[in-house]
Image (cartoon, helix red, strand yellow):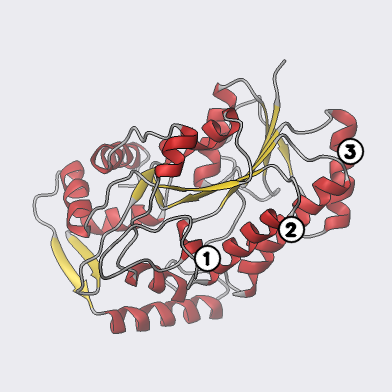
Amino acid sequence: MSKNILITGAGGFIGSFIVEEALSRGYKTWAGVRKTTNKEYLQDSRIQFIDLAFGNKEQLCRQLLQIRGSIGKWDYIIHNLGVTKCKNPEDFERINYGFVRNFTDALIETDMVPEKFIMMSSLGAWGVGDETGFTPLKPTDMPHPNTRYGMSKLKAERHLQSLPDFPYVIMRPTGVYGPREKDYYLMMKTIQYGFDFIAGYKPQLITFIYVKDLVKAIFSAIDKGITRKGYFLSEGVAYSSTQFRKYVASSLGKKIVIPVKVPLFLLKTICFLAEKGAILIGKTSTLNRDKFRIMKQRNWICDISEAQKDLDFRPQYSLEQGVKKSVEWYKQAGWL
């Protein structure tokens, strides 16, 4: 008998890939999306859509009771809902933490707690690592997030950990890239124009994970009998911005790309002004104060040994392979 799975944030970049994998595994797949969500990558007729009122716990409880009356429980929930940039800074905590608190409390109150609740967090919840010796961040290190996004994700993690016997698994990926993703895409588009903008002058080691490797780890967490743990996820290799530029340029057939190092003080000013300008016109900006803190961080290496041991996590895509796949998709989709 097929099991029921709910994926929240299903209309986003990562969420749409999670939905595809759930369908391929034969799950009865529910996609948690708002009515206004673009469903371009959610066209499969087997998908059942639901708009859950995460901001209102009483209404959410009523919705869950209706679901319980029709299908019983969702066997698995992948909570992929979250925001990385906001018009109002208070929305980071309201959505990334508040929605998790409301959802988990409502699941408990309505007796709808699943076999496993997987929450998408971020390496950013741990904050800045060792920028001198470049030792990898470890799950046992004391987290000290320095972005509003990271703080909100850590607060959500702490809430899950405070719930007795709640069957959570927390995923903390580093930079996720792949087809449909829009932030790394902007970097690739800049390289296509012949320039590569680099934050600061000091050495920087960055890490990545291809979206399909992340999705594989998520479903491995479902398959394994593990709960109440969190995992750092990356390809397991550190790269310089030079290497990223080289792979993108090669995939684009671009022979000459000019690296432009932007001083951190100037980048900080640009991000501040971009954020303020976006707020004034009622929009969000890719460049903002949180993004500045992310770009200035020198060490994004993390220890993935726990995921390797518990989840048999073995990334299949190197950065070179993943970039090639991504560029091919962007070209076919007319993005590049």
- In the image, taking residue 86 as reference, residue 162 lies left or right, namely right
> In this rendering, does residue 170 appear at all?
no
Q: Amino acid at mark 2?
A: Arg
Q: How many marks?
A: 3
| Occupied quadrant, residue 316 | top left
Q: Amino acid at mark 1?
A: Gly
Q: Residue at x 28, y 47 (%)?
A: 237
Q: Position of residue 167 (x, y in %)?
A: 69, 42
Q: Position of residue 175 (x, y in %)?
A: 39, 53
Say whether disc 1 or disc 2 marks the residue closer to the N-terminus: 2
Look at the numbered disc 3 and give the secondary structure of its residue: helix
Q: CA distance from mark 1 to mark 3?
A: 34 Å
Say whether disc 2 or disc 3 marks the residue closer to the N-terminus: 3
From this view, report whether residue 51 is shown above or below residue 3: below
Q: Residue at x 49, y 66 (%)?
A: 142
From this view, report whether residue 115 is shown above or below residue 230: above
Look at the numbered disc 1 and give the secondary structure of its residue: helix
> In the rendered structure, are the residues bearing label 1 and label 3 in contact, judged by CB atoms less than 8 Å apart?
no
Q: Which quadrant: the N terminus?
A: top right
Q: CA distance from mark 1 to mark 2?
A: 16 Å
Q: Which residue is mark 2?
A: 101
Q: CA distance from mark 2 to mark 3?
A: 20 Å
> In the rendered structure, are the residues bearing label 1 and label 2 in contact, judged by CB atoms less than 8 Å apart?
no
Q: Residue at x 58, y 28 (%)?
A: 223
Q: Which residue is mark 1?
A: 150
From this view, report whether residue 3 is shown above or below residue 178: above
Q: Position of residue 6 (x, y in %)?
A: 68, 37
Q: Which residue is mark 3?
A: 66
